[in-house]
Structures are given as structure tokens and as C-alpha cells.
Image (cartoon, rainbow, N blue to C red):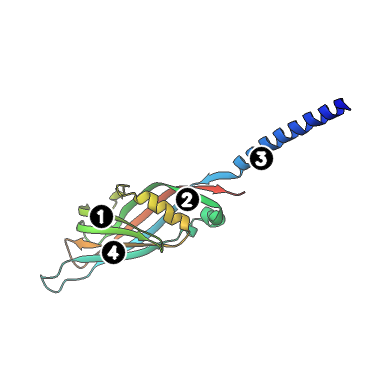
């Protein structure tokens, strides 16, 4: 009888150990990363100035929808969080050879937060790419905004050196998202 009890005890112990190890492996296998990219084209316009007392104020707006990336759309409710790899602003078109932004703001906004980058005396030309930094914790806030799953409004306003012009900025966000299925 003792032998049967000892044997049963050993079998139960090994079963528990095996089950615990297997669950950990299943847990690890249920988590993986995807690398989504989000883009938006921002059309900015500076209206014609009718007199010299007005300034050349530009503005433009667009939307970034986290669900626009097919991988994010599939796993939207299983995404645990995002890590922002980079966010860039590339000038894709100008109505002049070059434009100087005397001052300007790029704002990404959803219902929960507003993220802002400011520029001063930035010479723009077609193909110029600005890498937006994390000097005020913007990338962490952006990762939280993407996790919200809501559309993000992209707004740019400021003052340019000429009026009656237009330019287009391609905003591109490269990220890594952790997906947990179980």
C-alpha cells in the first residue's frame, strides 16, 4: 500500500510540475510582436495676404487611424502596448522651391491626450525629413494614444515666410506592438 501511495505521490508531483511548465510555454507562445506603420498626408495651406499687416499663417489637418494597419485591425483588442520606433515628417510637395516655417506646431490629439512638437525657423524643401524627438515624453504619450485605439487628429499650424503657398507633409509612425492572445 505504501508503494502505491509513494508512486501516486510521485506521479502527481511530476504531473503538476509538467503542467506548470507547459502552461508557461503556452503563455509565452500566446504573446508575440507585430510592427505596424501608420501614415497620414497633411495638406497645409497659407492663404493669400491682402495687405502687409497680416502674417502668413498656415494650417492643415488629417487623421491617423490605428485600425488602418491590417495587423492592428486584426489584433486591436489583444494589443498590450506599443513602443514607438520613430515618427517622421517628410515634405512631399511645395508650391515654391523652399519655404521657411518661422514657427510651427505639429499636434497629435485624441480624446485622451494632446502631443505637441514645435519648430522654429525650419527651412523646408521637397524630400526633407524631420525626425520628431522625445524631449517632452511625446513618444510615450503617442504609444498610449495608439493603445487607446481611437483615431488621432493630426494638426499643424504656424507662420511661414510667404503667403499664397501650400505644402504637404507625410507623417509616418513606425512602432512595435505586443499582442497577447490568451
Label 2 to label 3, Cα distance in Å? 29 Å
Q: Secondary structure at mark 3?
A: helix
Going by the picture, which residue comes out furthest to the right?
1
Q: Residues within 10 Å of mark 2 (few under 14, many from 20)?
A: some
Q: Is residue 151 left or right of residue 120?
A: right
Quadrant (top left, top right, bottom left, bottom right) of the N terminus = top right
The relative height of residue 72 versus residue 45 in the rendered view (above or below) is: above
Looking at marks 2 and 4 on the same chain, the residue that comes earlier in the sequence is marked by: 2
Quickly name the residue at label 2.
36
User: Which of the two discs, 1 and 4, labels the residue nearer the N terminus?
Assistant: 4
Relative to residue 20, is residue 133 depicted above or below?
below
How far apart marks 3 and 1 lie (CA) works out to: 49 Å
SS of the residue under disc 2:
loop
Please give the residue where the numbered disc 1 appears in the rendered image. 118
Image mark for residue 44 = 4
Residue visible at 32% across and 53% down in the picture: 89
Left or right of 174, for residue 180:
right
* Residue, disc 3: 23
Structural crowding at the residue carrying mark 3, measured as other residues with C-alpha within 10 Å and reported as few (<14), some (14–19) or many (≥20)? few
At numbered mark 1, what does the secondary structure look like: helix, strand or loop? strand
Amino acid at each position: 500500500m505504501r508503494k502505491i501511495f509513494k508512486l501516486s505521490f510521485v506521479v502527481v508531483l511530476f504531473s503538476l510540475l509538467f503542467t506548470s511548465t507547459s502552461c508557461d510555454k503556452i503563455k509565452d507562445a500566446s504573446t508575440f510582436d507585430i510592427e505596424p506603420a501608420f501614415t497620414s498626408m497633411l495638406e497645409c495651406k497659407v492663404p493669400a495676404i491682402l495687405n502687409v499687416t497680416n502674417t502668413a499663417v498656415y494650417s492643415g489637418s488629417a487623421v491617423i487611424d490605428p485600425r488602418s494597419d491590417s495587423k492592428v485591425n486584426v489584433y486591436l483588442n489583444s494589443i498590450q502596448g506599443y513602443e514607438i520606433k520613430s515618427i517622421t515628417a517628410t515634405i512631399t510637395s511645395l508650391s515654391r522651391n523652399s519655404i521657411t516655417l518661422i514657427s510651427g506646431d505639429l499636434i497629435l490629439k485624441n480624446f485622451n491626450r494632446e502631443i505637441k512638437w514645435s519648430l522654429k525657423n525650419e527651412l523646408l524643401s521637397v524630400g526633407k525629413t524631420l525626425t520628431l524627438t522625445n524631449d517632452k515624453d511625446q513618444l510615450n504619450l503617442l504609444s498610449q494614444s495608439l493603445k487607446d485605439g481611437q483615431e488621432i487628429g493630426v494638426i499643424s499650424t504656424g507662420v511661414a515666410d510667404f503667403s499664397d503657398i501650400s505644402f504637404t507633409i507625410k507623417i509616418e509612425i513606425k512602432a512595435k506592438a505586443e499582442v497577447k492572445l490568451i
